[in-house]
Image (cartoon, rainbow, N blue to C red):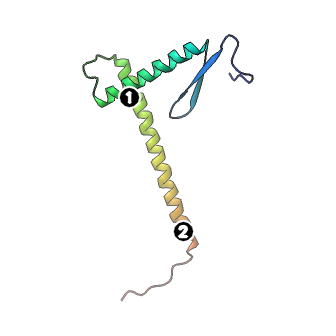
Amino acid sequence: PQFCGGLPPGYNAMFSVSTLRRNHFYAVLDSEEAMLWVRSLQEARQEAIKRKMGHAANMPYPNSWKYFDSLGNSLVQSKFRIRDKMEEFRLREMEMTNFAEAGPLPGAYHG
């Protein structure tokens, strides 16, 4: 649901989380709770970076974290594949436009 006039009743603060695809906005009771969420998310992000770099090998992590890491990795890879396909399509389109604008090819003699 969208709240046109501000926050829903009973909520006095909000924070946002930016992901690869969009921004998510969350309403919370007060600014202290918002800061707690932000700090927790920042710490979780740092832990994910440490795990990916191999600096957290001595720490046991639940298998569910590996699953969520793989979801994020596959989303990033999907984004790169889409970007590459769009670039390939754009280049092909430019080549076809240039070819069509050049007109008929002149005859050439190869002897």
At 42% from the left and 28% from the top, the residue drawn is 71
* Kind of residue indicated by mark 2: Asn
Q: Is residue 41 left or right of residue 47?
A: right
**Label number found at residue 22:** none
The residue tagged 1 is 70
Quarter of the view holding residue 77: top left
Q: Amino acid at mark 1?
A: Ser
Rendered residue at 48%/44% (across/down)? 82
Q: Choose between 87 and 7: the one closer to the eye.
A: 7
- The picture places residue 57, in percent across and down from the top left corner, at 25, 22
**Quadrant showing the C terminus:** bottom left
Q: Where does the N terminus fall, quadrant-wise? A: top right
Report which residue position mark 2 lands on.
98
Say which residue appears at 29% left-offset and 16% top-offset: 60
In the rendered image of this protein, does residue 10 appear above or below residue 87? above
For mark 2, give the secondary structure.
helix
Q: Position of residue 31 (x, y in %)?
A: 59, 15
Quadrant for residue 100, please give it: bottom right
Of helix, strand and loop, which one carries label 1? helix
- Where is residue 68 shown, x and y percent of the image? 41, 24
Q: Position of residue 17 (x, y in %)?
A: 54, 26
Q: Tell which circle, 2 or 1, labels the residue nearer the N-terminal end.
A: 1
Location of residue 68 with respect to 21 vertically, above or below:
above
